[in-house]
Image (tube, rainbow, N blue to C red):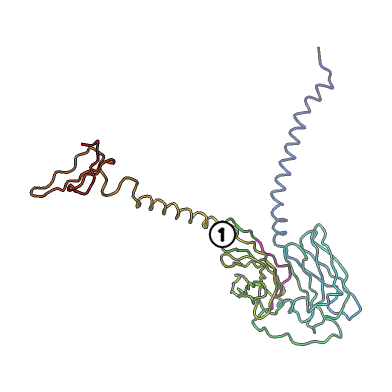
Amino acid sequence: MREGPGRGGARRRRPLRALAVLLTALLTAALALACGPAPLAAAAESKPAVTLSAQQAGKGGDITVRGTGWRPNALLMMLICGQSTPDRGVIGGTNSCANADGRAVTTDAKGAFSKKVPVAEPPKPCPCVVHVATVTGEQATVDAPFTVAGHPTAPLPQPTGGGKLAVLATVELRGSSGLLVWFGAPPSRELVFTVGNLGSAPVENPVFQVGTAYGVFAPQWEERQWRGTIQPGKKAQVKLPVQLSAGAHGDYQVSVKYGSKVLAEQPWGVGRPWGVTLFWLLLAVVVPAALFRIGMAVVDRVRPHRGSGRHRSAPPGTPGPAPAAGRTVPTTTVALPWFTPDSAPSENRPTTKGHT
């Protein structure tokens, strides 16, 4: 059968279409390779930035804060803070900010946002900034200089070289007791808490004091150093080891102190090491039983057996040992039960008849 002209033309066009699709895919891949690194590099180099609609405004007004380069769909907090500069940050933490008039904003898919913020006087004098920081996830902060009209101005405090730490989260005791603790080994835990630096200077390698108190007794303090640096206005999670003495049990109180201030306290209930009690009970039963068995074995070896005396009597009819030369062996006369001979005849003794 002969094919129609329409069907043959369609078959001839199929290789051309496949070739066109292949060329289109190759061109698309080449363009992606040529243009792809530039957007990626730009995204990698982009940093969070903030711009203000006005550099100065009075109390009761508002300004528009715009941001770019932030993490997509990130929750941000915007505050007007006093006693702060972009290079030194917010001195004193959020205690220097007008927290009641702060605003929250969420970035879009491109990491940008735009939000109006009311102008309020912070509790500290200017210089002031608009402080924008992430609330969750990776920490990112930008401080834009701003002047609150009519608000007092004062020089920035000089760095004192010391920080001020405060606990920001609940203290936890992590870990569990092993089998050896049941037999009196020292119980140990890991004290985990989050601290924030509320001071004006970074805190490097802070030394904490961990105290353990039993009942109403005073705690016994031991120094524990944490390796790291906590910048002003930042927070960090601290993990410190805690260990009690061997055989400890009961209700304990674990405290952590920095400098002369107690940061937090956490109760710790330690179970009784019943393995030690079981060991002493077994010892009280096994040792006396073993001593009793040893004593009975000694007595059984020392005491003589029946019939095993030093001078045993010879059975009847057994000849005795031969007498030594020149020694007279006394003879013993066995008396009969019905007759006892006299050693010498007596005239006065009557004669018994019928006996010879």
Of 75 and 50, nearer the camera is: 75
Please say whether residue 348 is one of the residues in the magenta stretch: no
Residue 90 occupies which quadrant of the picture? bottom right
The percent coordinates of residue 124 (x first, y second) are 80, 83
Establish if 301 lies above or below 216.
Answer: above
| x 38%, y 53%: residue | 299
- For mark 1, what is the residue? 276
- Mark 1 element type: helix
Quadrant where the C terminus lies?
top left
Mark 1 neighbour class, 10 Å CA radius: few under 14, some 14 to 19, many 20 or more: some
- The residues colored magenta run 164-174
Check the image and name the residue furthest to the top: 1
**Residue 73 picture location, percent across and down:** 80, 59
Tell me the quarter of the picture where residue 188 sits. bottom right
Residue placed furthest toward the left: 326
Establish if 66 lies above or below 158.
above
Give the camera-side residue of 98 and 19: 98
Residue 165 colored in magenta in the image:
yes
| Side (left or right) of 297 relative to 329 | right
The residue located at (63%, 58%) in the rendering is: 176
Identity of the amino acid at label 1?
Val
Give the percent coordinates (x, y) of residue 116.
88, 70
Task: In this rendered view, identify the residue nearer to me: 208 or 105.
Answer: 208
User: Looking at the image, is 314 positioned above or below residue 100?
Assistant: above
Number of marks drawn: 1
Residue appearing at x 79%, y 61% in the figure: 74
Does 279 appear above or below 238? above
Q: Position of residue 46 (x, y in %)?
A: 72, 63
* Quarter of the image where the N terminus is located: top right
Relative to the observer, which residue lies in front, 98 or 59? 98
